[in-house]
Image: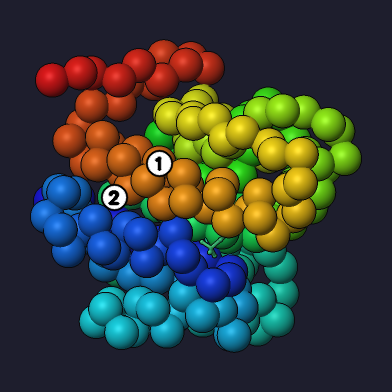
Amino acid sequence: MVNIGVLISGSGTNLQAIIDEIDRGRIKGRIKLVLSNRKDAYGLERARKAGIEALYIDKRAFNSEEEYNRKLIDELTKKEVELVVLAGYLKILSEEFIERYRGRIINIHPSLIPSFCGKGCYGDKVHQMVLDSGVKITGATVHFVDEGTDTGPIVLQRAVEVKDDDTVESLKERVLKVEHELLPEAIRLFCENRLIIEGKKVRIKWE
Ligand code: GRF
């Protein structure tokens, strides 16, 4: 059983998808801790309803990003977390954090990386950029996290068609549906030790 820590900043629908897949017995892992940089993140409520320890950590209580990240590391270390999942976590991790959990941090992004990603590309902005660009296909990506923003080796991707009458809301809804399948799937593969990072690529050991 892999100990999982989930970092969130918002509603937590991806967190809920992970909780539900664990409840269905499809993931050889357990969520030991949920951390949020936002007090009003509904994801904290979802965790508590599922009986999972959930902490809001106020960045303002720390003198630097490094100190704040060290606090995150301390809490995750206390719970012996082996896999860190960024599920709508909107802060950049410190180099110390990435070094500490290298190859064991995954993130979900609501586009087909390397399109519509990088600094400043998060949440509704991504879907607005997709609509403004006129592309016909978008999607979601799960990737390992490295020092860059959305640049780590890609684990899984799935495409979503962009419809002519799409709005940010309608597109986001369809992409989220795919995210809720893709992220638990990536976690399942990690927990079954079937992901092999080879440079910029991830190879999946099929059964
Ligand atoms: C998701 O679209 C995720 O890809 C992005 O932030 C959103 C978070 O949604 N990084 P939720 O909090 O999991 O509902």
For the residues marked 2 and 1, what is the alpha-carbon distance in whole angstroms?
A: 20 Å
* Residue 159 or residue 86, whichever sits in front: 159
Would you call the spot at circle 2 few (<14 residues within 10 Å), some (14-19), or many (20 or more)? Answer: some
Quadrant assignment for ligand 1? bottom right
The residue carrying mark 2 is 82
Name the amino acid type tagged 1: Leu
Residue 161 in the image: above or below residue 198: below
Residue at (47% x, 75% y) in the render: 43
Count every numbered label the image shows and give the total: 2
Q: Where residue 7 appears, x then y in whole percent?
A: 48, 63
Asked if the residue at tag 1 contacts the one at tag 2, i.e. Cβ–Cβ closer than 8 Å, the answer is no
Q: Residue at x 61, y 44 (%)?
A: 110
Q: Residue at x 13, y 20 (%)?
A: 207
**Is residue 101 found left or right of 122 in the rendered image?**
left
What residue is at 21 percent from the left and 31 percent from the top? 193
Residue matched to label 1: 182
Q: Is residue 112 left or right of residue 82?
A: right
